[in-house]
Image (spheres, grey):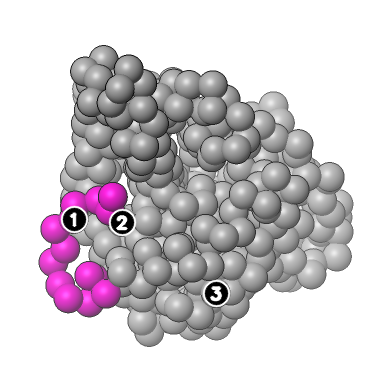
Amino acid sequence: MPATRHLPTSESEDLLALAREIAAKELAPRVADAERTGTFPRDVFTTLGRAGLLTLPYPEEFGGGDQPYEIYLQVLEEIGAVWASVGVGVSVHALSCFPLFAFGSDEQRVRRLPGMLSGERLGAYCLSEAHAGSDPAAMRTKAVRDGDSYVLNGAKAWTTHGGKADFYTVMARTSDEGPRGISCFHVPADTPGLEFDRPEDKMGLMGSTTATVRLVDARIPADHLIGREGQGLSIALAGLDAGRLGIAAVATGLAQGALDHAVAYAKEREAFGKAIIDHQGLAFVLADMAAAVESARATYLSAARLKDAGRPYGREASVAKLIATDNAMKVTTDAVQVLGGAGYTRDFPVERFMREAKVMQIFEGTNQIQRLVISRHLAR
């Protein structure tokens, strides 16, 4: 059943209806086969872009949808409820555009953002390295100034859309000053020296290509620096707050999808002469699943409203990411249990939901990192 939503305008209601329609007609018929074969659905992102759903939280003047985060995240949830790989991809694209939008010069925004937000191009975000996942300040990828260019060398791990994106937002070290020595760069996909490893063979989200991006004497013009030298880590952390809300929304959608499948199955499957949903032991499991989904949605929306109001929301974003992804793991696991032996087969999508939920607890900062962020806010 669709989530109960209180939307502020008729335009936002139309956006959610459009997202739900595209998810049902364009995504749902393809998701099982694409996830089974590991096929990256590039054309789906083009479809979403042309429908105006790929760049909702950015201003219209640059080609965005000019929607508040509260609305964008609910659209993202509707997509994630049907195809988590695509929901994650939309979130990553929005994250990859954030540094240039928030920290780029006026000239950079006018020149580059319309293309990035056109709906025809797809971005990737390069922060993590194999040895520095939860500790980005330990990154080793370097960018050395050489006249009117920077030359980049290093490897960025776990890159969503690695080898598929049209541009890469790359964090690289421009000095040895620890956290203050990291800078942010816009790297077009056709940059010589930009190479990609074989995509990771993952446990889930097989429709989302994840690969290590290698920079081998990759030369980019100096005006591809975003912000100032040494500002990269603060740019990255600012973007991650928004990215965590994106993952919270996708995780909530994933949990909603699992709940919907479990309820539908429990209404049809009979045991001891009645539908299994009418047995209290199972009905209470479903009730707990519903409560978990509702609480996750309320938590990410609360954080989004703070962001929309221009207020600090970093702690609340970490809370939302923690709650929504832990709840998604619990709800999807319970969905498998509700379906019993059938849930353990690939005849039903709930086993895939459970595998997909696991990584939600890991990327955009593990949930242990979220607890660290929250506790540090409490200690201030």
Mark found first going from the N terminus, 1 or 3: 1
Query: 259 or 51, which is in the foreground?
Result: 259
How crowded pointer 1 is (Cα within 10 Å; few <14, some 14-19, many 20+) is rated as few
Image location (x, y in percent) of residue 277: 27, 28
Query: 62 or 284, which is in the foreground?
Result: 284
Which residue was labeled with disc 2?
74
Whether residue 19 appears in magenta in the rendering, the answer is: no
Image location (x, y in percent) of residue 298: 20, 42
Label 1 to label 3, Cα distance in Å? 25 Å
**Residue range of the region highlighted in magenta in the rendering:** 1-14
Which residue was labeled with disc 1?
5
Mark 3 residue element: helix
Q: As drawn, which residue projects farthest toward the front?
A: 273
Please report the residue visible at 36 percent of the width from the left and 81 percent of the height from the top: 60
Please report the residue visible at 45 percent of the width from the left and 78 percent of the height from the top: 51
Judge from the rendering whether residue 9 lies leftward or rightward of residue 135; answer left or right.
left
Query: 203 or 364, which is in the foreground?
Result: 203
Label 1 to label 2, Cα distance in Å? 9 Å
Mark found first going from the N terminus, 1 or 2: 1
Which residue was labeled with disc 3?
47
